[in-house]
Image (cartoon, rainbow, N blue to C red):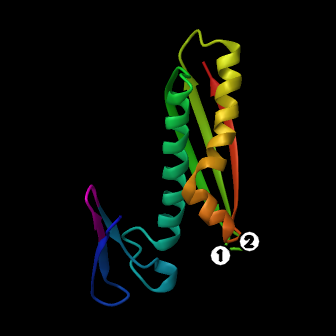
Amino acid sequence: MTTLQMNWSGSTKGSGTIEADKMKLPIAIPEHFGGTGEGANPKELLAASAASCYLMTLVAMLQGHKIPATGVTMTTELSGDKPANMHIVHTVQLELQEGAQPEQKQDAQSLIEKADKSCMIGNLIKESGVKITITSKATA
């Protein structure tokens, strides 16, 4: 079970927090909706949820397949304002150990794609009509 504790002070110009066991995050209404914009907003939280699920799924899959990854960096962009036109793009840069074998690079590329299909949060978001695309590059 996941439990979040939330609080809010003030009106639309106010602010709040979301807390969980290992997280405390400021939230605010975006400026274009009359808020201060001085905290995460729901759209950013949706993108962060999709991105963190995908990234952690990928890292676990790389480890499980003994791919010698030294680091993963990722950028996530969320465009659109309704599920029918929303699009999340994860751009993944996977760094493999120097000397990684060509088959390990191929396996890593395959896992980059498979992680998208295995990410629970991403799959839930896709069911609502949001498109998710993965672009990637594995280098040694």
Residue beneath disc 2: 85
Q: Residues within 10 Å of mark 1 (few under 14, many from 20)?
A: few
Q: Relative to residue 101, is residue 124 depicted above or below?
A: below
Please state if 9 lies on the left or on the right of 127 as rendered.
Answer: left
CB-based contact (under 8 Å), mark 2 and mark 1: yes
Rendered residue at 64%/28% (across/down): 108
Measured as percent of width and height from the top left, residue 83 is found at: 68, 74
Q: Residues within 10 Å of mark 2 (few under 14, many from 20)?
A: few
* Position of the C terminus by quadrant: top right
Looking at the image, which is closer to me, 138 or 12? 138
Q: Position of residue 91 (x, y in %)?
A: 63, 44
For the residue pair 95 and 53, the one nearer the viewer reads as 53
Q: Which region is colored magenta?
A: 18-23
Q: Which mark is residue 100?
A: none
Q: Residue furthest right?
A: 84
To which residue does mark 1 refer? 81
Amino acid type of the residue that numbered disc 1 sits on in the rendered structure: Asp
**Residue 46 part of the magenta-drawn span:** no
80, 124: nearer the viewer: 124
> In percent of the image, x 46 and y 77: which residue is there?
30
What's the residue at 67%, 71% (across, down)?
Answer: 128
- Identify the element where label 2 is drawn: loop
Q: For the view shown, which residue lies furthest in the top direction?
A: 99
Looking at this view, is 116 or 99 the one in front?
Answer: 116
In the image, taking residue 47 as reference, residue 8 lies left or right, namely: left
Residue 115 in which image quadrant: top right
Residue type of the residue flagged with mark 2? Asn
Q: Position of residue 36 (x, y in %)?
A: 38, 78
Q: Relative to 59, is 122 above or below?
A: below
Q: Quadrant of the N terminus?
A: bottom left
Q: Position of residue 113 (x, y in %)?
A: 69, 40
